[in-house]
Amino acid sequence: MSTSYTASSSYTVADIEKVVSRFSADLLMIADSTKALSQEKARTYARDVERLVKKGYLESVDVTLLDFFGTELRAVTYHVNTDAGSLNSSRPGGVLWPNTSGGAIRLVLRHNHTYTDSAQETMREDLETSWSPTSADTSHASLNAGNGRDYESNGFGMQRKDFTK
């Protein structure tokens, strides 16, 4: 006699919303502490990220604080993760970055292979920001990589990697 057991985990839209709300909280903290991005714009970016994630188009989001001269001061990269159970969920935080007079926040979205020209055209109507292609270097070679946080709910997650001076 033999028995087999199979376990699987699937996430729902509610799980995506829960995880993206943690990303949103981070982005709002970054905006508030740096004064380099308005709260309204941070919410707009977060809504676009949520819409892209729900459609399965997003691979990662990179958020970088630049000084007046364009030099990187801090950064975080959020990698979308659908590997059930591979992350331990954390609370948002740890992103109270310095108030940077004349600074700017740059967001770079990386899409996966499913974000075709057709998908992009369809999503254009749903997004609040006119996103455009960029050649920005998001390797953060001038910064030191550190620990980040994981945001996870029922197999859907965003894994955050932090970069500082």
Image (cartoon, grey):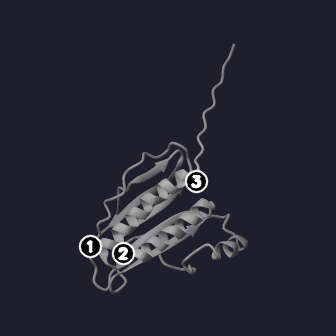
**Mark toward the viewer: 1 or 3:** 3
Give whichever of 132, 19 is nearer the camera.
Answer: 19
Measured along the vertical axis of the image, is residue 54 above or below residue 64? Answer: above
Q: Which residue is mark 1?
A: 98
Of mark 2 and mark 1, the one earlier in the sequence is 2
Query: Which residue does the image show at 56% across and 50% down from the upper left?
Result: 82
Q: Which residue is mark 3?
A: 13
Q: Are marks 2 and 1 in contact (CB under 8 Å)?
A: yes
**Mark toward the viewer: 3 or 2:** 3
Query: Which residue does the image show at 46% across and 68% down from the upper left?
Result: 62
Query: Which residue does the image show at 36% across and 65% down from the upper left?
Result: 163
Separation of marks 1 and 3 at Cα, in angstroms: 34 Å
Q: On the image, which quarter does residue 4 sit in?
A: top right
Helix, strand or loop under label 1: loop
Query: What amino acid is at disc 3?
Result: Val
Determine if residue 143 is in view. no
Query: What amino acid is at disc 2?
Result: Leu
Helix, strand or loop under label 2: strand
Residue 42 circle label? none
* Identity of the residue furthest to the top in this view: 1
What percent of the width, then of the height, locates residue 46? 48, 68
Q: Which residue is mark 2?
A: 65
Mark 2 Cα shell of 10 Å, populated few (<14), some (14-19), many (≥20):
many
Mark 3 Cα shell of 10 Å, populated few (<14), some (14-19), many (≥20):
few
Give the quadrant of the N terminus. top right
What percent of the width, then of the height, locates residue 72? 36, 76
Query: What amino acid is at disc 1?
Result: Pro
Judged left or right of residue 120, residue 87 is left
Q: Are marks 3 and 2 in contact (CB under 8 Å)?
A: no
Give the quadrant of the C terminus. bottom left
Of mark 1 and mark 3, the one earlier in the sequence is 3
